[in-house]
Amino acid sequence: MGASTAPVGNDTIQNQTDVRGIWQGGLTTAGSSGMIFTNSTFLQDTGDDMIFGHNNLTGSTTNDLPTGGDWDAGNGQRWLRVWYLDKSDVNSNGGSVDLTFDFSDGGMSGTPGGASSNYRLLERSGTSGPFSDITAASGATASISGDQVIFSGVNANELGSYYTFGTVDKNESPTAVTVQGFTARSGLEARFLEAIWFLGALGAVGGVLLWVRRRVGRL
């Protein structure tokens, strides 16, 4: 019987939620509640693997954002859900992977929008403190597909420790659509607002909700 090539994570990964992995000779794509790893050129040798799991948080925050450049405009936001990565590159060959962040799978409402370049791949070395924006350093190209933000061609050498994703402009390119509460009204206005609230609960397109908010403010 041949030896198994399935990877075994370290102590830290064993304390994460929804632990998944990709490895040479096994799975080449795997998802963990909002984040999907897809191998491109990283899995080359027996023993190459990436194992990942998250902290089981849901929502967005403006805490611990990167600083400098576009981040200094003060419009940044990131997911609270953070993944820990345990990586093994046996012969240090490097390579690349694609990382996809899926809004609905991550428990977030709405869809990404605006310029895809507003979305950034974030990393830090520990469980606390500010993240670093590694999008440019990793060579990643961001794109939007439905309710997913995809970072293609991520240099595996730039990945390790803790990571998530964020935006430098939460107004144009939110990390989730939040439906604002409203004061009850009577008659036609009430029915109009109830219909909008229902659409928001279904995760209507962000641009439509922004238009509605402007209209509601004039009622």
Image (cartoon, rainbow, N blue to C red):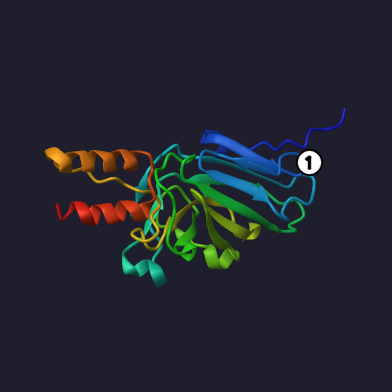
- When asked about the image quadrant of residue 81, the answer is top left
Measuring from the top left, give residue 125's x and y in whole percent.
50, 54
94, above or below 22, in the image: below
Q: Amino acid at mark 1?
A: Gly
Q: Residue furthest left?
A: 186
The residue lying at 41 percent from left, 59 percent from top is 167
Position of 43 with respect to 141 (left or right) is: right
- When asked about the image quadrant of residue 207, the answer is bottom left
Position of 7 with respect to 172 (left or right) is: right
Q: Is residue 63 visible?
A: no
Measuring from the top left, give residue 206's x and y in whole percent.
36, 52
The residue lying at 58 percent from left, 45 percent from top is 36
Measuring from the top left, give residue 120's x and y in whole percent.
48, 60
Q: Is residue 175 visible?
A: yes
Q: Residue furthest bottom?
A: 69
Position of 196 with respect to 29 (left or right) is: left
Q: Regarding mark 1 in the picture, which secondary structure is present there?
A: loop
The crowding category of the residue bearing disc 1, from other C-alpha atoms within 10 Å (few below 14, some 14 to 19, many at least 20), is some
The residue tagged 1 is: 25
Q: How many marks?
A: 1
Which is nearer the eye, 27 or 13?
27
The residue lying at 40 percent from left, 57 percent from top is 130
121, above or below 195, in the image: below
Which is nearer the eye, 40 or 156?
40
Q: Residue furthest top?
A: 1
Position of 138 with respect to 57 (left or right) is: right
Measuring from the top left, give residue 82's x and y in whole percent.
47, 46
The residue lying at 31 percent from left, 65 percent from top is 74
Which is nearer the eye, 195 or 6?
195
Looking at the rendered image, the quarter that the N terminus falls into is top right
